[in-house]
Image (cartoon, helix red, strand yellow):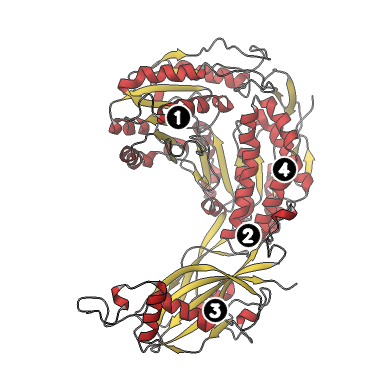
């Protein structure tokens, strides 16, 4: 029997012994064996820290982001290979698309996040703070990569997405990782990792893979490591309680299966688009991946006067689903991941039947096409009805429907009397990854969100306005957090830059503005400026230095200037009109438009008489007007190079897609603009962005 290989300490290695047999979930045929017996987990973790970590830490955020982009492009060229293997997990083409291309999409999404970070190894986090009267002492927060390894213990249901959505984040942050996929589907994870390693895109030690038991891996963690877990709440609790994790204060991010719910709004009735939207959403969530999703809808709450109509509509919709071999184009639902998983689901349904009755499907038989139902891990969709969701089930603290999860194509429908009761029922799950309310009533939507949000990591408000483009109840997105309170694990994954920060150490930094500017490569207010030698706009991107500073000439602001700007812009706000009676206002007399002062600033700092490396003005950030400017005031500008960011060259695949400027190498420069009056006080401040050409 072929053994899966582990990629550790720079080599592909098979473990000792026969290992655990892995099977084709559709045919029941053995595929391979997986074992980590004989592996030295201490050496594996040390290799990540001593080889992978230094290599990644030397790279800037932008370099690491471009690395992810290159990796995503590479994997996209091997989709056929991954799909062919994915079918053996029981996944249909649609299931595999979510897992494989959804995972690659995570790489692309996180690669684009590099633009939210500096092209540096240090990142400023949040605002800086002046801590002294004379502006010589300040503080800020910085982020740097932790010096350990990220250990990812993943679930069986998404062997590709589950890995890529996690490693994308730790690699962007600058930490290496060890991936331990669930053994039952680890053969697909292995295939993807083999392509990643073969690409040569990642530095050595950035990614290691173990297929089989985690052994004593967690006994070798340190305070610089991060552990993530996706799976059952009971297993997560066991891992989280590891004494080494507790002693070393190791961050542990847990995303556990939960009793997610969907609520039909009281306003929804047959004939409304929302009625059909609800039914289709439930069918999709019960059958996609054969219901094996941590975000799957386990509880359905509907107004009690519509209970029978709704469950009959759901049952009719489920009856249209063709189950069988995923390679058959007619099939819309494949098998569970394996025979043991099917038996586990059946056992959990038996527990649920203590409080419910089966109204659709069967635990004993299922009609399949192009497959053998007895050899494959097939199971019929199962819809249960619990007419008394508040009743205490013997042996449980609440009702079994709020405590037991069958991790498969199983959902329970329950009645509610009003929105307050729907909210209370949703909370009985004690924390979930996501909840959905289907309603066209904005007031009801707000009431549900305000009442239920404390117990759910994500809430989808689904109606006819967004249904066509909605990613659905069960789809976590790279830029939104994935996780939830309580039973759902209390963790957060993804979420854009929020997820990246899990792998970064936040440190408060104090010192003089000039010192902190030198450390962070971002100009801090009141730091010493540098003589640029020539006008900054005459410098190429590569020549500019942080702190290059221009002090402009002065200009007197007149009442006539203000009048002309009012006429030109159409802004005749009363404060800009000199005949206004200013009694009871905030102003002493006619005041200049803030945007006029900003325009004057541009006129003072722009060198406009000849072509120069500045290609265009890219925008204005953080514009504030801090002091009124009256006629007679004399204004000058302090103009300082604040930060430099690369601007990746746009890839043009077809000549007709070429746009003017695509062939120019360039970067984005942020400038601090301080508008100063004749009392030497700042009247306005802004950050402007210019696109600047690089040297050829």
In percent of the image, x 43 and y 28: which residue is there?
278
Q: Residue 380: percent from the left, percent from the top?
A: 55, 16
Q: Which residue is mark 4?
A: 75
Q: CA distance from mark 2 to mark 3?
A: 24 Å
N-term mark: 2 or 4: 2
Looking at this view, is 161 or 262 the one in front? 262
Numbered tag placed on residue 277 in the rendering? 1
Callout in the foreground (1, 3): 1
Q: Nearer the viewer, residue 392 or 195?
A: 195
Residue denoted by label 2 = 61
Q: CA–CA distance between discs 2 and 4?
A: 21 Å
The relative height of residue 323 versus residue 231 in the rendered view (above or below) is above
How far apart are the two marked residues, 3 and 4, measured between alpha carbons? 43 Å
Instruction: Give the residue number, with chain letter if any, for mark 3.
Output: 640
Instruction: Answer few, some or many: residues within 10 Å of disc 1's Cα (few below 14, many 20 plus, some between 14 and 19).
Output: some
In the current view of this chain or complex, which residue is farthest to the top?
364
Instruction: Classify 10 Å Cα crowding around label 3: few (below 14), some (14-19), many (20 and above).
Output: many
Viewer-side label of 2, 3? 3
Camera-nearest label, 4 or 1: 1
- State the quadrant of the N terminus: top right
């Amino acid at each position: 029997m072929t053994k899966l290989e582990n990629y550790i300490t720079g080599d592909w290695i098979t473990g000792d012994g026969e290992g655990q047999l892995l099977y084709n979930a559709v045919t029941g045929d053995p595929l391979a064996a997986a074992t980590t017996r004989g592996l030295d987990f201490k050496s594996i973790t040390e290799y990540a820290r001593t080889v992978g970590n230094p290599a990644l830490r030397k790279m800037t955020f932008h370099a690491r982001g471009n690395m992810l982009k290159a990796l995503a492009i590479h994997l996209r060229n091997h989709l056929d290979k991954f799909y062919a293997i994915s079918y053996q997990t029981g996944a249909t083409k649609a299931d595999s698309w979510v897992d494989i291309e959804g995972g690659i999409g995570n790489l692309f999404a996180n690669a684009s996040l590099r633009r939210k970070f500096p092209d540096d190894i240090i990142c400023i986090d949040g605002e800086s703070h002046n801590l002294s009267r004379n502006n010589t002492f300040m503080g800020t927060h910085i982020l740097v990569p932790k010096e350990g390894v990220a250990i990812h213990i993943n679930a069986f249901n998404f062997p590709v997405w589950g890995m890529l959505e996690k490693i994308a984040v730790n690699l962007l942050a600058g930490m290496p990782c060890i991936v331990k996929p669930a053994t039952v589907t680890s053969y697909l994870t292995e295939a993807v990792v083999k392509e990643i390693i073969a690409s040569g895109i990642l530095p050595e030690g950035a990614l290691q893979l173990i297929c089989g038991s985690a052994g004593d891996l967690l006994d070798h963690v340190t305070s610089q490591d991060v552990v993530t877990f996706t799976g059952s709440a009971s297993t997560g609790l066991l891992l989280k309680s590891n004494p080494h994790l507790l002693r070393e204060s190791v961050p542990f991010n847990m995303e556990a299966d939960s009793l997610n719910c969907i609520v039909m709004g009281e306003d929804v009735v047959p004939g409304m688009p929302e009625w059909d939207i609800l039914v289709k959403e439930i069918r999709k969530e019960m059958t996609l991946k054969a219901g094996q999703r941590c975000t799957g809808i386990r509880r359905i709450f509907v107004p009690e006067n519509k209970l029978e109509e709704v469950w009959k509509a759901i049952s009719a919709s489920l009856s249209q689903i063709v189950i069988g071999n995923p390679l058959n184009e007619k099939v819309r639902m494949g098998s569970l991941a394996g025979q043991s998983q099917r038996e586990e689901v059946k056992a959990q349904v038996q527990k649920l039947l203590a409080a419910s009755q089966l109204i659709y499907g069967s635990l004993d038989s299922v009609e399949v096409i192009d497959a053998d139902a007895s050899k494959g891990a097939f199971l019929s969709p199962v819809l249960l009805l619990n007419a008394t969701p508040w009743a205490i089930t013997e042996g449980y603290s609440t009702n079994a429907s709020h405590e037991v999860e069958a991790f498969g194509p199983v959902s329970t429908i329950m009645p509610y009397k009003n929105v307050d009761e729907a909210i209370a029922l949703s909370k009985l799950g004690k924390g979930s990854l996501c909840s959905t309310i289907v309603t066209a009533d904005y007031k009801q939507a707000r009431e549900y969100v305000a009442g239920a949000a404390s117990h759910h990591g994500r809430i989808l408000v689904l109606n006819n306005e967004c249904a066509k483009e909605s990613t659905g109840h069960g789809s976590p997105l790279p830029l939104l957090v994935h996780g939830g309170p309580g039973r759902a694990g209390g963790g957060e994954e993804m979420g854009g830059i929020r997820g990246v920060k899990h792998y970064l150490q936040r440190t408060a930094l104090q010192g003089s503005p000039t010192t902190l500017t030198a450390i962070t490569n971002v100009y801090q207010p009141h730091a010493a400026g540098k003589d640029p030698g020539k006008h900054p706009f005459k410098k190429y991107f590569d020549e500019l230095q942080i702190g290059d500073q221009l002090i402009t000439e002065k200009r007197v602001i007149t009442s006539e200037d203000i009048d002309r700007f009012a006429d030109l812009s159409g802004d005749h706000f009363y404060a800009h009109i000199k005949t206004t009676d200013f009694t009871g206002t905030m102003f002493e007399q006619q005041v200049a438009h803030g945007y006029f002062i900003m325009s004057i600033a541009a006129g003072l700092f722009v060198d406009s008489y000849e072509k120069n490396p500045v290609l265009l003005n890219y925008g204005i950030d953080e514009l504030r007007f801090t002091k009124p400017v009256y006629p007679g005031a004399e204004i000058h500008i302090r103009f300082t190079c604040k930060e430099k960011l690369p601007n990746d060259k746009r890839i043009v695949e077809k000549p007709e897609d070429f746009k003017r400027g695509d062939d120019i190498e360039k970067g984005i420069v942020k400038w601090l603009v301080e508008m100063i009056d004749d009392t030497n006080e700042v009247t306005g401040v802004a950050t402007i962005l210019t696109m600047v050409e690089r040297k050829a």
